[in-house]
Amino acid sequence: MTVLPLRPDLQGCEPYGAPELDVPVRLNVNENPYPPSPAVVADIAAAAGRAASGLNRYPDRDFPGLRAALADYLAAESGVSLGGEQVWAANGSNEVMAHVLQAFGGPGRTCLSFTPTYSMYPEYARDTFTRYVTGPRREDFTVDVGAVAAAIARERPAVLILASPNNPTGTALPLNDVVAVLEAARGHGPADTATSGDSADSADTATDCVVVIDEAYAEFRRPGVPSALELLERTDADGTPRYPHLAVTRTMSKAFGMAGLRLGYLAASAELVDMLRIVRLPYHLSAISQAAALAALDHRQELMSQVASLRDERDALVEWLRAHGWNAHDSDANFVLFGPFADREAVWRGLLERGVLIRVVGPEGYLRACVGTSQEMERFRTALLAVTGNTTGQATTLVNEEKNA
Ligand code: PMP
């Protein structure tokens, strides 16, 4: 028998990922349920075809065309004006985040986050030999900025990751809180040992902790909820970025309805983006991916047209769950965390038997369902009532019918 030298810290680990099951109603990985229209498909296919004729050559390594197009999209979506040099992209925001940890994390460095949150964060840290430290969110899943500042001062993290809206809770961060965190992060990153030598605690070698606001679900936020992108426009009196240590990650996987494309991106200061270019593998974004993403971005209005109805469906789901006696958290994303259930695994299995796949994730007793089409949501609601024996809905219906009679 051969014994392969898997890294000791990876022994016994399972690959990350939700079960991939072929069932009629898939509400488990927060995708957009609407496939691209035939017109969008035709344009993407034509763009991929044109790119295919040049596949003997490596793709554009720094892809300025796609970065400018993503900056354009952000301007339309959030009203924030950024240059293409302030945008970075990779195969999903997962890979973008891996670049961040490769550039700023590493042995002897710390990545800080606040839980419950997205369960890939510890994996980015593990894979880059970065220590992963977490603090708790409040009971309502908001972030206690004082506690974040205290943890930053204590841990001197190289990277702080906060998801907004958060997965799996749907909680968005107020802009003032992001500002407070950015101020707390200033000068409180790890000591810059490259320039300080042994005097690791000397003040002039202090770095700023990189603050990543993971906005994978930002397009689903409720009206009036700001994006941290706005903070990238702020400058000091001399015109330099006020928050050069802020990075906002986004993805085409969710609201944009292109999870299969694998295109995530980040907006930050040009200085930070340039540092990510050091660690990316050469030609990491294939010519086909670049061409398909550019073609999809041309259709942004159509691809985003379902976002409003998905938001309505989400808000209706929260109300329906509450009307049936469950806790459901307000969400700025395309999913809802709800419960509690004495045996959430049993509820998950019962739903699966009825063709509905959701996710066991988050605090004990809770489940997360993402928002599908209205037909899918109807099926989810019917299945959940059947599995849990909840008759509150039937009782409500009877009362209403009696009133109408
Ligand atoms: N961030 C969060 C909070 C997520 O939930 C996800 C996907 N589930 C991602 C990042 C990664 O998405 P992608 O790699 O598809 O861009």
Image: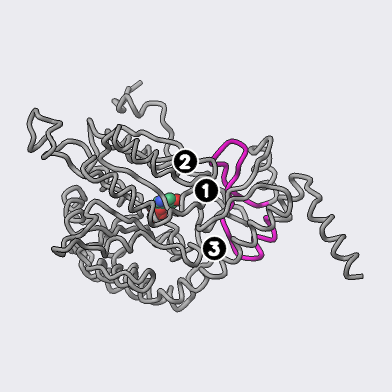
Q: Residue at x 22, y 32 (%)?
A: 107
Question: x and y percent of residue 389 in the render?
Answer: 79, 45
Question: x and y percent of residue 25 in the render?
Answer: 62, 56
Q: Is residue 331 left or right of residue 402?
A: left
Residue 169 numbered tag: 1
- Nearer the camera: disc 3 or disc 1: 1
Q: Is residue 118 above or below residue 295?
A: above
First of labels 2, 3 by sequence position: 3
* Alpha carbon separation for disc pair 3 and 1: 20 Å
Residue 68 numbered tag: none
Q: Quadrant of the N terminus?
A: top left
Q: Is residue 59 visible?
A: no
- Nearer the camera: disc 2 or disc 3: 2
Q: Residue at x 54, y 45 (%)?
A: 140
Q: Is residue 208 visible?
A: yes
Q: Nearer the viewer, residue 85 or 245?
A: 245
- Look at the numbered disc 3 and give the secondary structure of its residue: loop
Q: Amino acid at mark 1?
A: Thr
Rendered image quadrant of residue 126: top left
In magenta segment, residue 274: no
Q: Residue furthest top?
A: 1
First of labels 2, 1 by sequence position: 2
User: Mark 2 highlights which residue?
Assistant: 137
Pointer 2 and pointer 1: residues touching (CB < 8 Å)?
yes
Residue 33 numbered tag: 3
